[in-house]
């Protein structure tokens, strides 16, 4: 693939747009590529377009910008989805409304009411893009970066013919392996000797095996987290709070290590603060929307400083690094043999073509280390989940699949079922009230079928009628 065309839909996303521009300017396989930036926000699209033209010096690279993805898709080899309309605004609503009913979401982008409503807001657009790709660039790869990654991936697997997989940057290689080696005091020169098997639903992933040159190092990793938990102080940011202690506790419980604890801890009821006997670990804090907005504003200011010349563009090249998606695309272009963690179905594994996780079904949509070839990612064998943890994987997959089914059938009762079985929701009544209240506050971004047949105001019922405990979000 000598001249790949990469289309980024949601190029104004600070999560991915800057790093994609850096990668195209630095990685050798992109020297003759076309970078197509797509965003519906003309101001942010113009900022990224200017940054790209400043940063990319190669004469062989073509940079183009569009406000309509249909104009960008013809001839595409890779289409990266990295958008979420008014993400911070809606995420704040979803986390705060959830907290009002006793659901503490430290991240709020995958599970619980926030994850389900994020899917409601974004999946229809994702499916429209996939169907348009079937017509305009049927051989292209669709790479989804929009959360919830597994839910969106299941929807694409079930309802589109386009080739696709989903990504999350948590397990960016080789940094993930380097981090565990550093944790146990081993040199990163031992990287090739580390056999690390991680798998699970995105944001609910677990290390099932870890051997260094044939030696089992799971006990050493467990002990390292125990040491980190001793005297652990509040890290401040909700996703980072007491992660050593929670990792150590969950490792003791299940016998394998959670590898994405900042997300995984909100998948379980243990840290919600509702138990009669409380854990020593403080209950979860609600996602820090104010902190995210400050971070976003800082990133945009940096981009404006590069464009204006206040900061030299050389500083951009020095401070930004490649991204998980651009590294993967680069490997697919140059076929360099690198492996990556990718979300896809649990089948077609490298060793025997069967299931990578042997005690989950072939169509389970999991994040696993994959080998990249001309036909896309193929997972390595990951082993089996221990009892108890296997059922939790099934549970999360069912919630994700029910959410997609509710959207495709426009069936509110399926949506109620999906939220009712969420591990953090404690009654069907709570699920219904959550859906009603979130619909009232986000109705401009939601289809009408999500709302009640007779609209219900959150003030029309007393707390006794709702049969849920109201909790003051400020106390978190």
Image (spheres, rainbow, N blue to C red):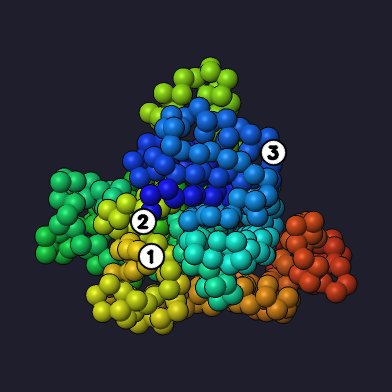
Name the secondary structure under disc 3: helix
Closer to the camera in the image, 340 or 198: 340
Labelled disc at residue 42? 3
Q: CA distance from mark 2 to mark 1?
A: 8 Å
Tell me which numbered mark, 3 or 2, is placed earlier along the sequence: 3
Residue depicted at x 42% and y 32%: 58
Q: CA distance from mark 3 to mark 2?
A: 31 Å
Residue 207 position, x and y percent, is 30, 64
> In which image quadrant can residue 124 be found?
bottom right
Tell me which numbered mark, 2 or 1, is placed earlier along the sequence: 2
Labelled disc at residue 471? none
Tell me which numbered mark, 1 or 3, is placed earlier along the sequence: 3
Labelled disc at residue 376? 1
| Badge 2 density bin: few <14, some 14–19, many ≥20, Cα 10 Å | many
Residue 278 position, x and y percent, is 48, 62
Label 2: which residue?
A: 332
Residue depicted at x 56% and y 24%: 307
Say whether marks 2 and 1 touch (CB < 8 Å).
yes
| Badge 1 density bin: few <14, some 14–19, many ≥20, Cα 10 Å | few
Residue depicted at x 54% and y 65%: 138
Residue depicted at x 33% and y 41%: 28
The residue mark sitting in front, 3 or 2, is 2
> In which image quadrant can residue 59 be found?
top left
Question: Viewed as shown, does residue 198 lie left or right of 305?
Answer: left
Residue 227 visible in the picture: no
Residue 177 position, x and y percent, is 26, 53
Instruction: Establish if 320 lies above or below 2.
Output: above
Name the secondary structure under disc 1: strand
């Amino acid at each position: 693939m000598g001249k790949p065309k990469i289309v980024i839909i949601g190029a104004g996303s600070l999560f991915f747009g800057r790093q994609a521009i850096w990668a195209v300017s630095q990685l050798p396989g992109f020297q003759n590529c076309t970078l197509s930036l797509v965003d519906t926000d003309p101001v942010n699209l113009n900022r990224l377009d200017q940054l790209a033209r400043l940063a990319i010096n190669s004469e062989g690279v073509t940079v183009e910008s569009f406000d309509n993805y249909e104009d960008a898709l013809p001839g595409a080899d890779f289409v990266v989805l990295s958008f979420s309309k008014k993400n911070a605004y809606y995420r704040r609503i979803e986390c705060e409304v959830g907290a009002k009913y006793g659901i503490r979401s430290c991240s709020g982008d995958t599970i619980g009411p926030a994850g389900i409503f994020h899917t409601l807001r974004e999946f229809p657009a994702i499916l429209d893009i996939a169907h348009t790709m079937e017509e305009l660039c049927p051989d292209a790869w669709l790479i989804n970066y929009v959360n919830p990654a597994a839910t969106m991936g299941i929807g694409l697997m079930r309802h589109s013919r386009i080739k696709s997989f989903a990504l999350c940057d948590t397990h960016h290689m080789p940094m993930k392996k380097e981090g565990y080696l550093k944790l146990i005091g081993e040199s990163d020169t031992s990287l090739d000797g580390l056999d690390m098997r991680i798998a699970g639903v995105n944001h609910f992933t677990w290390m099932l095996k870890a051997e260094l040159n044939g030696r089992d190092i799971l006990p050493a990793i467990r002990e390292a987290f125990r040491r980190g938990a001793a005297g652990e102080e509040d890290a401040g940011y909700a996703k980072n709070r007491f992660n050593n202690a929670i990792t150590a506790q969950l490792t003791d419980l299940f016998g394998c290590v959670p590898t994405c604890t900042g997300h995984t801890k909100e998948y379980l009821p243990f840290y919600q603060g509702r138990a009669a006997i409380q854990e020593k670990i403080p209950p979860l804090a609600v996602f820090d929307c104010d902190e995210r907005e400050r971070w976003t504003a800082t990133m945009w200011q940096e981009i404006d400083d590069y464009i204006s010349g206040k900061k030299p563009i050389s500083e951009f090249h020095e401070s930004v690094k490649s991204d998980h998606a651009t590294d993967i695309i680069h490997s697919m272009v140059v076929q360099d043999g690198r492996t990556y963690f990718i979300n896809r179905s649990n089948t077609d594994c490298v060793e025997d073509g069967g299931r990578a996780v042997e005690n989950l079904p072939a169509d389970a949509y999991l994040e696993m280390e994959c080998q990249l070839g001309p036909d896309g990612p193929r997972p390595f064998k990951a082993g089996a989940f221990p009892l108890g943890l296997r059922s939790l994987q099934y549970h999360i997959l069912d919630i994700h699949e029910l959410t997609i089914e509710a959207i495709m059938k426009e069936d509110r009762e399926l949506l109620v079922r999906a939220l009712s079985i969420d591990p953090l929701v404690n009654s069907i009544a709570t699920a219904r009230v959550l859906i009603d209240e979130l619909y009232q506050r986000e109705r401009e971004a939601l289809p009408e079928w999500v709302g009640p047949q007779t609209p219900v105001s959150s003030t029309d019922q007393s707390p006794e009628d709702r049969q849920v405990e109201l909790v003051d979000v400020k106390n978190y």
